[in-house]
Amino acid sequence: MEQRKVSHPFVLRKANHSAGESIKRCCRWMLESENTCSIGHRWTPGNMAVTTVILLQLTLVSLVSAAHYISGSMTFTPKGSGSNGTFRIEIRNKETYHMCSDQHSYSCYSGNCGYEIASQSGEIDKREDELNYEHKWCETETVETRILPNDKPFVLGETGCCWTETRTPGGSSWRLQTLIDLGTRSDTEQSNRPPVTAVLPVLRVPENCPRAYRLMSFDPDGDSVQYRYGVSKYTECYQCRQFNGFHLDQDSGTLHYLKSTAHDTVYGFELVVEDFPQEMITLNYTDGTQSKKCPLLRSVNGSSAMSNATTSNTTTTTTTTTTTMYLMPTPLSKLPLQFSLLVDPPAPSCMDGLYVPEFKKPTPEDGTRVHAQVNKEMEIKIMAEVFYGTIDHIYLTGPLHVTKHKTTDGEFFIRWTPAESNVGSYFTICFVVESHFRHSVYQSEMRCVLVHVGPEQVKTDVNCEGSRMKLTFEKASLSNSSYVRLMFRNPNDYYCSLYSYSNSTHITASIPLYSCGTHLEEDEDNLIFKNEIVAADSLTGSITRRTKLGLNFYCQYPKKGTVLQSFTVHRRNVTVWDKGFGTLTYSFEFYPNSRFYNRIDPDFYPLEYELGDRIYMEIEVSYIYSYLEIFVESCKATPYDNRYHGQSYTFIKDGCAVDSTVQIYHSYYYSNRFRFSIEVFDFIKNYDQVYISCSVMVCDSRNYNTRCAKGCISATRNPFFPGRRKRDVSAESGVHFVSQGPLRLKRSAQSTATNLNLNAILIAGCVLVGVGIIYLKMSRPKWQLLRSFKS
């Protein structure tokens, strides 16, 4: 057989006695059926040449490029087909820079990439407490829904400039490229689903401490997952370097750090993740064509045949030897996975728990599978310890809207609420913790959990009252209705009984906050009261070990942080307790003009404005000390009463007016009031309504070194300002958050009437949050979180 010219980096492979025969059969199967082996390669019995199609010229550049690129990844999820023959797909694109930027823009490298119909973006996590700018980063994710005209394969990607300063000379641009093939698999009768993977944007390791980073290698279809370095020739990367001191195990997806030298710049890894079927399958397309896919070729020692192929024709005076070449299997999908790795100075000891943080139970083991439910908050508890130094931070990567929290006891919680569109999907959440000892930073091992989202199961409602928690759920929603008895962990009184208020259809409990075995947790913002319902073997017996039921629930009360989580149209005053200042009560009101005499009546909410109108606002704090003053750090507008929402418009930041229409009305007589105004902006026009939320604090006006006294501190005025430092509790309070709204643009009478009717059905709430979490107790010492609910 003659040598064939191909454009795929790993297309040809020498036959060997162990695996070559299976590949030979697969390739012959492809050739005889006249099918496409890979994008751009057409094989026919009469023509053994391959037409090379270049997916992307190097001169094409994305419309959006950003400096200081640190990491990036792309993946996709098939979302089915429509009655008109189109297909829907969800694209998830994560990118990390030194500053937060969610302006992701895609290019179609080959095929028909369809068009966008919906998109949302937001922050995943960020590091901002470093004085060294190069060690700061912010990861964002864009989730985009696309409509495709057919199910044929295509390549979608993004490219830009520039990588952060790396230890690779030259080649500063970056490129992400994703191969998507929605053909129907012959084994599952569904479109192919790609591998599920993730990695922290920046990994850190001491120079003298070898470490293994195991990347998630899960495939929803049970395919073989392969990791490899990108190849520049095929537009998979720009730097495309394989670094000395590291070893990538392609089959297990494990990156081994062996040895290097410490440096302030990072190694920039540009990996490619591919999936291959376990057996020969066919991908069928709606236009009647097919594509054959073969299993991954593996050699005798178990390693994958993923190296550049060569062909040799050796001629001697007596014989001619021809080495037969075969087509290498092409992947079902191809995903980019890029990240940075920083080698820190040597640690005094590499033993976990001394200088390098060590995870402790109940932190899930690496690779643990977690089950979540739609619209129910799942929670992962993480604990770590270190002998020398302190553990200050946890950093994570995961799906959009994942959050992290730290208690005053040094415990961490990761929480996420899946949406309806996530049912059936898999997500990876990876995390590390960092400790500080003197001027050194030490990062723990990276652990990742696999989250599978299922439909809602137990119907639970948690109501947090002033001094009690009330829990209600349907008996029919339990997976096993034959439980002999349900009880709290410590049912010591009559009011701890689950049957005092229950009926034939619902289990109802109403218990005091400090009774029935309730456990109190505290973080910087909230007091969290947690309890658990378990099953018993008998009416008077102990906790069962057979039924495997557990129901966790909690109530969260704001202390001095997020002080407003209300669903009323007009937000009530917010009262918080702050150490050193006692009880503080904030009011946030709107006024008709700059005289600020009479506030707008709450009965007129939601307020309606026209573009160009001026909105007058006042934030006032009531306290017992006359020498205090109020300070507003930031204000933003969001389409929902959620200051963390990805879509927002900030008009006050770091105490500075960043919108040209902002006016601040200073008063020398009322230091407890902050009055300001802004013109109605186009942001309102893009949404049905918006809310205004502000972060505020109070300070001792006699102290000239407080954050209040410093006033506006912008990057342009003082680029060396290190940000928030540890506060003096006797001179300034913590940051509190208040909001008010909603605001709307004026509409016609018919439209206005409709809006008012919608507001009439809004549920009045309070600043309390109730959450229930279902989990199963497994035979192994692992917990699978199943569901939660926010009232």
Image (cartoon, rainbow, N blue to C red):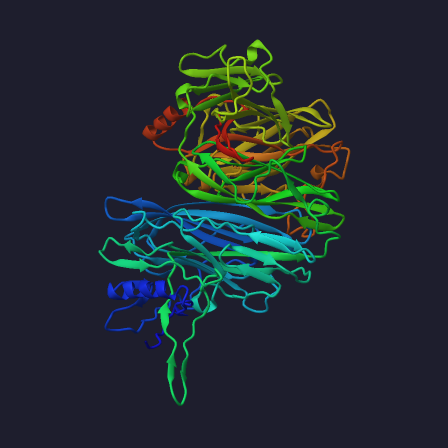
The image position of residue 440, as x and y in percent, is 73, 51
> Relative to the observer, which residue lies in front, 529 or 540?
540
Does residue 555 appear in this view?
Answer: yes
Does residue 770 appear in this view?
Answer: no
Count of all numbered marks drawn on residues in the image: 0
Pick the quarter of the image with the N terminus. bottom left
Q: Please, is residue 35 above or below residue 125 in the view?
A: below
> Relative to the observer, which residue lies in front, 510 or 775?
775
Residue at 24%, 48% (x, y): give it: 85
Q: Please, is residue 553 above or below residue 633 in the view?
A: above
Single out the residue that lies furthest toward the left: 288
> Relative to the observer, which residue lies in front, 461 or 383?
383
The image position of residue 84, as x and y in percent, is 23, 46
Kindly indicate the quadrant of the structure image that contains residue 48: bottom left
The image position of residue 458, as x and y in percent, is 43, 26
In this image, 232 relative to 672: left or right?
left
In this image, 518 relative to 28: left or right?
right
